[in-house]
Amino acid sequence: MAQQFEQNSVAIGEPFLKQGDVLTGADGGSLALDYEDIDGPPLHPNCRCSLQPKLVDDYESIRRELEAEINASEEAERNA
């Protein structure tokens, strides 16, 4: 199940799985989600899934640029 979550990104406010979906486990078993939408872990009693934020490409490039500026500024301060 973790692999299925890992392969699919979900926008904030969107359910990971919708009511009526069927989730297939690693051992071939299935879990029918017939009660409500699933907004995040835990899904079952031994669930080890967690949420990890993922930035959109534009934000990732902005983060890299800011990080480079900070590093350059810190380097300039060390050399001053």
Image (spheres, helix red, strand yellow):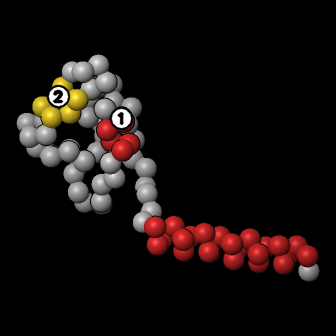
Amino acid type, residue under disc 2 in the picture:
Leu
Horizontal relation, residue 24 to residue 78: left or right: left
The secondary structure type at the circle numbered 1 is helix
Q: Position of residue 47 (x, y in %)?
A: 33, 30
76 versus 38 height, above or below: below
* Disc 2: which residue: 31
Residue at image point 26% right, 34% down: 43
First in residue order: circle 2 vs circle 1: 1
Q: Is residue 31 visible?
A: yes
* Crowdedness near tag 2: few (<14), some (14–19) or many (≥20) residues, C-alpha within 10 Å: few
* Disc 1: which residue: 2
Horizontal relation, residue 68 to residue 12: left or right: right
Horizontal relation, residue 6 to residue 44: left or right: right
Residue at image point 10% right, 43% down: 19
The secondary structure type at the circle numbered 2 is strand
Residue at image point 27% right, 26% down: 25
Q: Position of residue 80 (x, y in %)?
A: 91, 80
Residue at image point 84% right, 78% down: 76
